[in-house]
Image (spheres, grey):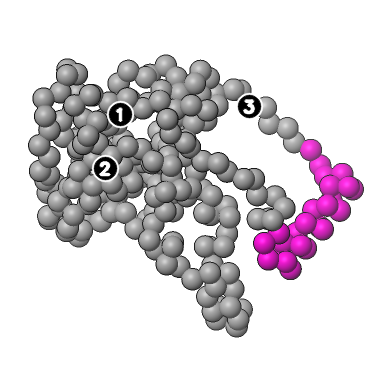
Amino acid sequence: MQIIFRCDPALIPLLPQPIPAKQALPDWLRAMPAKAFSDMHEREIRTVKQCPPFVDAMSHGFMILLPCDIRVEHGTFTWDWDLPPLSVEEHPRSPLSFHAPAQIMGAPFHDGRSSAIKFNSFWTIELEPGWSLFATHPVNRDDLPFRLLSGLVDSDRFTDAGINFPAIWTKPDFNGILPKGTPVAQCFPVPRAAQTLVFEVMSPEKSSRYTSIVSEVLTTPGIYRKRFRAKRGGPGTQ
């Protein structure tokens, strides 16, 4: 899978490039202990840091990064980003724009008053034929003061303009700097091929294997990681 990113020539020295999501794992995950004492179990148990599906989900795909520092003070967003003249017309020059409250009226994540912010895109994204781009909030990142709204774009066809990423600001008491390079959207290609759902009852062989695997998972640490987890090369660059 080749993913092609393009931007205005004048922005090349200024923009942070999208990066593999595994390079954007948060400090809190790195600092998390591998084990913690559980009052319920009365012993130490493994934390989610040792859960491959949890970490693999956070490491999947690539991250779109905030292009400059944004200062937030009492609900007001400001930035100081001196862009050079751009060669592409109709190109955004601000890192943020907004959706009017009416555009998300009736959605459960809307308070009826606030606008949704929109992270403007400065990269176009091109995927191989038959693939779409799934964009969502950085996985398991409730520490971020916003919640991205998920979207699916046919980026094998929509390749000549940037994709903008709407979000709800979730921490109204946040005052400070959202720094340049903050992950704002986690993206990964998904195939558009039609799906067929098949439903079956377990055969005696499948039932036996189910019992055996669950027993091993419960009694032997690392079974999934050692026997079932696929190696991931991650996105490269050229």
Within the image, what quadrant is residue 90 found in?
Answer: top left
Which quadrant of the view contains residue 32? bottom left
Residue underneath mark 1: 123
Instruction: Answer few, some or many: residues within 10 Å of disc 1's Cα (few below 14, many 20 plus, some between 14 and 19).
Output: many
Q: Which mark is residue 195?
A: 3
- Residue 16 falls left or right of residue 47: left
Magenta stretch, main secondary structure class:
helix
Q: Identify the mark nearer the N-term, 1 or 2.
A: 2
Which residue shows up at 86% across the image and 53% down it? 208
Question: Residue 215 magenta-drawn?
Answer: yes
Q: Earlier in the sequence, mark 3 or mark 1?
A: 1
Mark 2–mark 3 Cα distance, whole angstroms, equals 35 Å
Q: Secondary structure at mark 3?
A: loop
Which stretch is magenta? 200-223
Q: Is residue 209 above or below residue 222?
A: above
Q: Secondary structure at mark 1?
A: loop
Q: Which residue is rendered at x = 11% and y = 29% of the image?
A: 84
Residue 177: x and y, percent? 18, 54
**Residue 64 image offset from top left, x and y in percent:** 34, 39
109 or 217, which is in the foreground?
217
- Left or right for 207, reference 92: right
Label 3: how many Cα within 10 Å (few below 14, some 14–19, many 20+): few
- Mark 2 or mark 3, which has the lower sequence index? 2
188 is higher (above) or lower (below) than 37? above
> Is residue 99 in the magenta section?
no
- From the image, tell me which residue sits under label 2: 66
140 or 114, which is in the foreground? 140
Q: What's the distance in space between the residues labelled 3 and 1, CA to CA?
A: 31 Å
Q: Disc 3 vs disc 1: which is toward the camera?
A: 1
Q: Amino acid at mark 2?
A: Leu
Residue at image position (65%, 49%) is 229
